[in-house]
Amino acid sequence: MNIATPIQDTSPSSKPLIGHTACPHDCPSTCALEVDLMAEGRIGRVRGAPDNSYTAGVICAKVARYAERLYHPERLLKPLRRAGEKGSGSWQEISWEDALDEIAEAFVKAEAAHGSQAVWPYFYAGTMGWVQRDSIERLRHAKRYSGFFSSICTNPAWTGYVAATGALRGPDPREMAKSDCVVIWGTNAVATQVNVMTHAIRARKERGAKIVVIDVYDNPTMKQADLKLILRPGTDAALACAVMHIAFRDGYADRAYMAEFADDPAGLEAHLQTRSPQWASSITGLTVDEIERFGALIGKTSRSYFRLGYGFTRQRNGAVAMHAAASVATVLGSWKHEGGGAFHSNNDIFRLDNSTLVGRGMRDPSIRMLDQSQIGRVLTGDSTALRHGVPVTAMLIQNTNPVNIAPEQRLVRQGFARNDLFVAVHEHFMTETAEMADIVLPATMFVEHDDLYRAGGQSHILLGPKLVEPPPTVRTNLHVIEELAKRLGVADMPGFGLNERQMIDQILAASNVPDYEWFLEHKWFDRIPAFEEAHYLDGFAHPGKRFRFRPDWSHQPAPNRPPESVGLLGPAAEMPAFPDQFDVIETVDADHPYRLATSPARNFLNSSFAETSTSRQKEGRPEVMINQADATAAGIASGDIVRIGNGRGDLRIHARVTDEVKPGVLVAEGLWPNKAHLDGEGINVLTGADPVAPYGGAAVHDNKVWLRKDA
């Protein structure tokens, strides 16, 4: 039974009750959690639910110590109004009523001066709970505020996978445990989705399965690999093409399967004639032997499961690379087998109807759509980023920290420093975005409110009921949206006036899923489709039911395609007809001889957990990883301060000399707050916001830079 209220028994001998919930953070695992509920109404230990077949009792260490975050002494507890210059850190406490009144007044003022599109509600995935995350969209549509194109995380990977299969679904991730070869490609799973390792390691123990890891440096997941392939950033498609070349050359290609399920296997085979291991070696930096070994291993192993991660989405050629990697499973016919096929996300299987939640019926397609990744350009008046419309002069920000996490950081800070820009931030901590706000509101955390979750990296819909009472001066995201709707005159429009439980039940009823009370008893609902559907054995999801080796990059539907008013993005016209290396990444040159990846750290999740002392202690300090040969040539030793830069900016950072990165590649794990860096500017000073072809994205791991020892 799910516990949804604080326990009342205060006797010292009583054992804590167990609350059941789901991890709210931006991770494909969406772990099912057990939380100790202590006698004083506080939470204790947090652990993975052992009876959830995907979580299987295992969660990451940062979530296991969640009490440290919930009861952090620097947690925001009172609404605040700016009392000095922007960013000065001078605040005064105000009441909730006054704070909400001032936000509404600022929005009305912005609309009166420039029209409704001068207001830009801005949010993202600080919580993945549907009600607390997405209710801001209902206010946006009701008020005709500027639209929000959520490009920063998923687009290239989702677009590439769907271009191949036609849908964002794949073999049950629990089947990794039944595989004979698990290929973990483009994700540092040990650090970012530990449950992938749970099932891969089980396959190794129970079946003798091999684990292959493909990434750009020797990270913790690499250290679990039987075969590690460390390639140059942005060259994944070249590797995929070479192993498909091997499959056709050496007889591993399943021609009968392709004849039934693929669009143009003959055209692909002809195209790949020149994409040999020798060709790929010169591009990827892998040896010919490494590529041959990988090609032979998966060619001889029918049950090969390709777990394709979000690393693909961080490169300018990410959509093409994801499509190429998924194509490998089709050439081999891996989809036919339990424990085989290619998986990226199950987003399409849940079929949850959120139309009332987000106010879809009120959406006006003529309202402009602004790109979240280009917030720096938007706020500094770039005409193209503004879609040639009015300036943004008022914002409400929930669940994200763009002053830290968005690319082109110098533009972002410049935009937030505008005196004519009003910003309200609803947050847990005084983030670097909150520091630039006019009004700061304290937000509840996930055990303090009700919400509903789905798990793109697995197949469960999970309930996250309120387990403990929040501090009395803290409010939910939904509360803020509802109160602003009243003040802005739209509270009588569809979807407003429902509390969390009512909204959850509305979503579940519209989606033919059991109700809130059922979830209280059963905790989660498994939406996994039948084996034939998950493996596309009844045909792929395109018209004609064939896997597309020849994707339609211009007209292909995608889960997050920009509207027609925005159109294709990036160099879409140059995208290749078949899987191929797409040379649009930032390649090194004489002035910028290094490639920089801004990879995730184990103890942070985007900018979350960067405030907790244990996570900070375990990560140490911001550092850039430099290969020993590069360091020697530049006269750099571990611990030295170096300067790295490109045309967007430069920053100082400590060096860590290591053989975990290859020559010519730098890795800065994070995401550290800007203020944790030596000069108060973080790694996103160096990342760009130019959109990824064809449907947008932010290529934050795709950067050419120079490096030198700081004088």
Image (cartoon, rainbow, N blue to C red):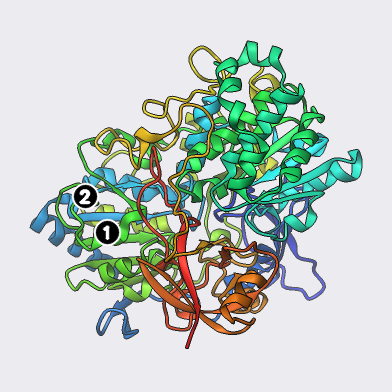
Horizontal side of 285 relative to 388 (left or right) equals right
> Residue 377, which numbered label?
1
- Asked whether the residues under the numbered discs 2 and 1 touch, taking CB atoms below 8 Å apart as contact, a structural biologist would say yes
| Image-based side of 452 in relation to 88, left or right | right
Rendering coords of residue 678 (x, y %): 48, 83
Depicted 532 relative to depicted 314: above or below: above
Q: Disc 2 designates what residue?
A: 384
Local secondary structure at mark 2: loop
Q: Residue furthest bottom?
A: 711
Does 601 appear above or below 507? below
Residue name at image x 50 percent, y 55 percent: 127
Taking depth in this image into account, of 345 and 294 the one nearest to the observer is 294
- Measure the C-alpha gap from mark 2 to mark 1: 9 Å
Give the residue type that dot 2 points to. Answer: Thr
Q: Which is more N-terminal, label 1 or label 2?
A: 1
Q: In this view, does 432 lie to the left or right of 364?
A: right
